[in-house]
Image (cartoon, rainbow, N blue to C red):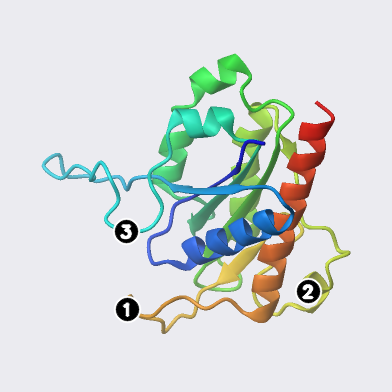
């Protein structure tokens, strides 16, 4: 079957870490996962983004979006909303909307912030809106996940989240708490399982 697309934008690596863990969760369900990112946006006209990222996942294409069996969408929080590079990509998906390419496919959202109350839930809810317009089936995190009751950092029923360590530097690799990691794995597994069920009943 077609892979689940795990699409994210990450500036310092926290959202990327969540994306990688969600992808592992998808694959643990027996469904393939495909990691993709979006290019940054530059305000200087003399600085265009590289056509290929220097490291990490490749840039997403319209074909990746059209052919996926499900979508996990992730972004760091920017003033309670998704980051501009991801919003810019979503604003270019009118063709896929007209085709109905994502109708009845499962989708979920995830985010990271630098503080506990930095806008995680508003970001997750706003990220769901384009998926609803595309006709996707929103896949949240149910309270049957024990870590959702126990977490003191990231994790919401709207989607997995991560609270980045304030003193972390750009040279340090982001570390998820055990609860954040468990919830990211669970969200990926749930998304992958739902994509597989929908595929077999199509």
Local secondary structure at mark 2: helix
For residue 29, side relative to residue 42 (left or right): right
Q: Position of residue 177 (x, y in %)?
A: 62, 79
For residue 197, side relative to residue 75 (left or right): right
- Residue under numbered circle 2: 147
For residue 57, side relative to residue 41 (left or right): right
Q: Position of residue 29 (x, y in %)?
A: 74, 54
Query: Is label 3 in contact with label 1 (beta carbons under 8 Å)?
Result: no
- Residue under numbered circle 3: 55
- Of the numbered discs 3 and 1, the one sitting upstream in the chain is 3
Q: Residue furthest bottom?
A: 167
Residue at left offset 75%, top offset 46%: 139
Nearest-to-viewer mark from 3 and 1: 3
| Label 2 crowd (10 A; few <14 / some 14-19 / many >=20) | some
- For the N terminus, the quadrant is top right
Q: Residue furthest right?
A: 144
Q: Is residue 166 above or below residue 107?
A: below
Q: How many marks?
A: 3
- Residue under numbered circle 1: 171
Q: Position of residue 57 (x, y in %)?
A: 41, 52
Local secondary structure at mark 1: loop
User: CA gap, disc 3 to disc 1?
Assistant: 14 Å
Residue 10, can we see it?
yes
| Label 3 crowd (10 A; few <14 / some 14-19 / many >=20) | few
- Of the numbered discs 2 and 3, the one sitting upstream in the chain is 3
């Amino acid at each position: 079957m077609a892979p689940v697309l795990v699409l994210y934008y990450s500036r310092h690596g926290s959202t990327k870490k969540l994306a990688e863990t969600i992808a592992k969760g998808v694959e643990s369900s027996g469904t393939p996962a495909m990691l993709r990112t979006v290019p940054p946006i530059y305000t200087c006209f003399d600085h265009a983004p590289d056509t290929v990222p220097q490291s990490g996942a490749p840039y997403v294409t319209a074909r990746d979006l059209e052919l996926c069996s499900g979508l996990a969408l992730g972004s760091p929080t920017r003033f309670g909303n998704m980051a501009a590079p991801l919003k810019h990509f979503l604003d270019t998906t009118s063709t896929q909307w007209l085709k109905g390419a994502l109708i009845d496919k499962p989708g979920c959202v995830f985010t990271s912030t630098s503080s506990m109350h930095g806008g995680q839930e508003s970001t997750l809810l706003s990220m769901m809106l384009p998926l609803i317009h595309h006709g996707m089936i929103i896949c949240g995190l149910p309270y049957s996940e024990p870590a959702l009751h126990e977490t003191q950092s990231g994790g919401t029923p709207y989607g997995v989240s991560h609270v980045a360590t304030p003193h972390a530097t750009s040279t340090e690799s982001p570390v998820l708490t055990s609860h954040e990691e468990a919830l990211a794995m669970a969200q990926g597994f749930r998304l992958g399982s739902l994509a597989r069920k929908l595929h077999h009943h199509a």
